[in-house]
Image: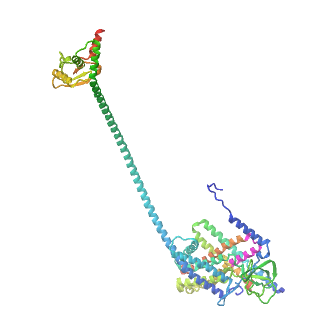
Amino acid sequence: MTTEATPKKRTPVKRWIVLALFVIGGYAAFGSIGVLKPISPVVVLPAEPTGISIAGFPITNTILATLIADLVLILFAISAYRFSKSGKQVPSGMYNFFEFLVEFLWNSVKGAAGKWAPRIFPVVATIFLLVLAANMTKLFPGYEAIGYMKEIHEGKTGYAPVKLFDLGSIPVYGLDKNHPVIGAAHGEEHGEAAGGEAHGEESAAAKEMCTACEVVPFLRGSATDLNFPFALAVITVVLTQVYGVWALGPSYFSKYLPVGQLVSGGIFGLINFGVGFLEIILEFAKILSFGFRLFGNIFAGTLLLSIVGALTAIVVPPFLYLFEVFFGAIQAYVFFLLATVFISGATVSHHAEEHH
Amino acid sequence: MNDAAAFIAGMKVLGAGLAMLGAIGAGVGVGIAASGGVQAMGRNPDATPTIQTNMILGMAFAEAVAIYALAVALIIIFAA
Amino acid sequence: MAALGINLGFFLFQVFNFTILATLLYAWAYRPITNMLENRKNIIAQGLEDARIAAEARANAEKEAREIIAKAQAEANQKVRESTERAAAAAREVMAQAEAEVAKLRESAAAEATLERDRVLADVRGQIAALSMAAAQRLVGEALDEKRQRALIDEFFSGVKSGKVVLLEGSALSGASAEVTSALPLTPAEQETVKKDVLARIGAQATVTFRVDPSILGGLVVRVGDKVLDGSVSGQLETLRAALH
């Protein structure tokens, strides 16, 4: 205890809350009814449709998650816009953090790209912020937990649904871990029934309840869908070419087709011509490595979280969550850094080096 | 599920697992890159930003091998 | 590809989404923030420059202030010294003045006391005469003529007999000033007589001062220069006592 005149009586309320949450989590995982227990996930690679569609375009759960990440970023951007209009000098609150991020990125890009930094910055910064926002929002509770229930594929193990309560007119089901059911052969898919690890929703027009159920979540991390990282990878690689042509003109393509060296360089010219083909292949390899790096890390992380969460519901998952926060940020930074290096490298002429 | 289908399914999983052996090399490569980077930063702390960038770049290229292995494994399991 | 979830529609959606987001962020965040960062850098540079100038100015001001303080201290010390000296001088002066005043006061008080005593003695002279007469009457038992008696007493006290100073007869005196001492203050007429008699002997330009000394009991003591003519009763008593011994 401090020997102050008025010693503050610190009531460790937060500590007790955390402890209580631990106890509740332990009870839910091991001692309670099956509906509270975490279930093993069903590994699905493609994004699943949420049932919503806009103008005939089905919205998948990863698209929904991407839109949420967009929304977060746009809120930050609006705060930045309002701050810039307010004319204040001292940043505060939410905007302060955002400005810290942007300043960090700006300094990184400026260090790597030099005078091309202002043109490259919007692309690579958006890549970083979007990947970061997607990776962070996907860690919120509710992602990959709330969805509708579907009859599981034949031969896999699903769980029996248990009705919990009615949310308005929509009945909410949970999955009972104590009653695993092997999926039977079935011709048609039962849809529309809702469920979740803890709770789910069912559309009012529930036709037929599934017996061996899996949950199709409404939200799933954007980067666990290959479309998202590959879109970013393709954008990066395409923009690399665009910036190269912008900076160097048509001579940029001499990297891929070194015709001049073929004429003047003799046998080494021929070799360099072959290297040019390799460069072209390398660009496609870049797309592949960009896309699969982000996807692989995030998908593996998500899988790890849900599997370990199903095995040991307490103690271990919090550390894995921390690990995921770290990896989400690192992957965003790696994607950003590689994009910056590739794009800024394309704006620098290769002739100067080759002639020496 | 007849025997042939079960055999194919089992071999797919086995193949995917074998494909992921490629991650060993990537792991070693990333470790070497990190070790070299940290040593370099220890010797010349002023050059940390440059070293860090190049280290991450090198790690990314080393990791690419593991990523190809992952891609192959995923394709074996889901697409083949 | 479809098994891996890659779908042209979703892929294009992501590209489209990225484009829109990049545009929005560029307009709302990147441009304002980078501008602001540049502004802030300039402001900070300006501020640092200002601070440097201000620090310099402050250093100068501090130096000046130190100098001013030192000068002021020297001046103050000087002033203090001067004023201490001045105060000491003034104190000495005041003391001297006070002493002089005290001396003057003492002198004047002494003079006043002498005057007062003389006046009182002059007042009581008549009474003393009356008392002497009464005592003598009682003593000799016969009533003398009162006028004669008074004349005798006056003669006793003033040593002046029928307009002549008895003491001076047959003596030669010379000097610039004469001091005449009587037991009781002389009346103005007697003084005039004494004065005229003394001046007749030592010269008209000499000054004559009168003193009263009751201890001589009666008669006059005249001092001219370094010569004293003692016609006082106490002197005669002294002579008598010497003769008796």
Q: In this view, does C145 lie above or below C208?
A: above
Q: Position of residue B80 (x, y in %)?
A: 74, 86
Residue A307 located within the stretch drawn in magenta: yes
For image coordinates 46% across by 64% down, the residue present is C51
Q: Quadrant of the N terminus of chain B?
A: bottom right
Q: Can residue A31 be seen in this view?
A: yes
Q: Main secondary structure of the magenta part?
A: helix
Quadrant in which residue B76 is drawn: bottom right
Name the residue nearer the viewer: A283 or A142: A142
The total of numbered circles placed on residues is: 0
Residue A3 position in % (x across, y down): 63, 54
Q: Residue at x 66, y 73 (%)?
A: A325
Location of residue C221 in the rendering, given as x and y in whole percent from the top left corner: 24, 19
Q: How is the image coloured?
A: rainbow
Q: Say left or right for A165 vs C200.
A: right
In the displayed structure, would residue C85 be above or below residue C218? below
Residues in magenta, as a range: A296-316
- Residues A183 and A129: in front is A183
**Residue A24 in picture, x, y percent from top left:** 75, 70
